[in-house]
């Protein structure tokens, strides 16, 4: 069994933790009689990709710029605002989406795009999002430097149809990362009662690596 590995630091969720932090609890697998919504997975994966690409384009075009400049350029509902942080609220298929930006000395240095799995539309829905977004990022940045599928508990490993359950309860997580001229792009799918898809891009400028 592999030990968990990640390039993301303990402080990775630098401004989202207070938005949804939940204490650790024992979690039982959900009943499999949930009447899932009828969803077009291809359409939703396309929307995740569209939002993620827009997020990355915003970051790349605003590195080093001020919080006020980014606020003027980005449309959407503000969920949290501080002198060094700006978080926009979005949604995909009723899932909460948080799009956040961090500033140092009023210069943009880091961003995160996070999708939270609420409600549960399909057991492997978020694995599909991860796979489609990873493919999109690989097309843009090449083969990832890190590309990991890590089982902390292999209970569901023999049953691929339930791998989404393994993600939700913390038994399985996915990670990939790329190095670019600007900095580091990292993609993760993890879970703690709910699946969480996270895309982070942080620049090397202005001492952004911490």
Image: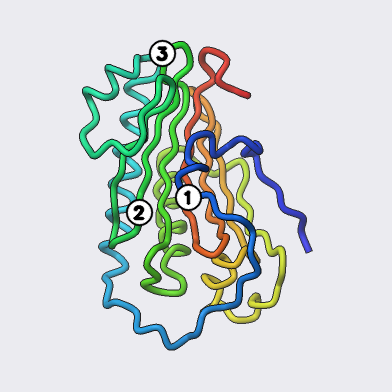
Q: Earlier in the sequence, mark 3 or mark 2?
A: 2
Mark 3 burial class by Cα count in 10 Å: few <14, some 14-19, many 20+: some
Task: Give percent across and percent down for residue 176.
Answer: 56, 47
Quarter of the figure with residue 172: bottom right
Q: Residue at x 44, y 21 (%)?
A: 84
Q: Residue at x 63, y 24 (%)?
A: 210
Name the secondary structure under disc 1.
helix
Q: Residue at x 36, y 40 (%)?
A: 99
Instruction: Classify residue 4 as left or right of residue 86.
Output: right
Of 203 and 29, which appears nearest the observer?
29
Asked if disc 3 and disc 2 are in contact, CB closer than 8 Å, the reply is no
Mark 1 burial class by Cα count in 10 Å: few <14, some 14-19, many 20+: few
Q: Nearer the viewer, mark 2 or mark 1?
A: 1
Q: CA distance from mark 3 to mark 1?
A: 26 Å
Residue tagged by mark 3?
Answer: 106
Task: Give percent across and percent down for residue 152.
Answer: 71, 63
Quarter of the image where the N terminus is located: bottom right
What's the image's color scheme? rainbow
Residue tagged by mark 2?
Answer: 96
Name the secondary structure under disc 2.
strand
Q: Residue at x 54, y 31 (%)?
A: 184
Name the secondary structure under disc 3.
loop
Asked if disc 2 and disc 1 are in contact, CB closer than 8 Å, the reply is yes
Residue tagged by mark 1?
Answer: 20
Q: Nearer the viewer, mark 3 or mark 1?
A: 1
Quarter of the figure with residue 209: top right
Q: CA distance from mark 3 to mark 2?
A: 27 Å
Q: CA distance from mark 2 to mark 1?
A: 11 Å
Q: Is residue 36 above or below residue 119?
A: below
Q: Earlier in the sequence, mark 2 or mark 1?
A: 1
Task: Give percent across and percent down for residue 181.
Answer: 49, 23
């Amino acid at each position: 069994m592999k030990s968990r590995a990640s390039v993301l630091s303990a402080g990775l969720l630098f401004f989202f933790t207070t938005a949804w932090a939940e204490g650790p609890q024992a979690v039982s697998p959900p009943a499999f009689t949930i009447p899932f919504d009828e969803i077009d997975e291809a359409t939703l994966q396309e929307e995740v990709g569209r939002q993620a690409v827009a997020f990355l384009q915003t970051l790349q075009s605003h590195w080093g710029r001020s919080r006020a400049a980014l606020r003027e350029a980005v449309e959407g509902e503000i969920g949290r605002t501080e002198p060094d942080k700006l978080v926009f609220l979005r949604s995909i298929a009723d899932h909460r989406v948080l799009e956040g930006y961090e500033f140092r000395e009023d210069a943009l240095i880091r961003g995160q795009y996070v999708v939270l799995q609420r409600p549960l539309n399909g057991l492997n829905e978020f694995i599909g999002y991860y796979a489609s977004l990873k493919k999109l990022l690989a097309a843009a940045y090449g083969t990832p430097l890190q590309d990991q599928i890590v089982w902390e508990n292999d209970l569901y490993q023999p049953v691929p149809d339930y791998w989404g359950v393994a993600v939700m309860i913390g038994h399985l997580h996915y990670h990939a990362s790329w190095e670019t001229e600007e900095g580091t792009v990292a993609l993760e799918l993890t879970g703690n009662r709910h699946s969480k898809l996270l895309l982070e891009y942080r620049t090397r400028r202005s001492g952004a690596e911490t």
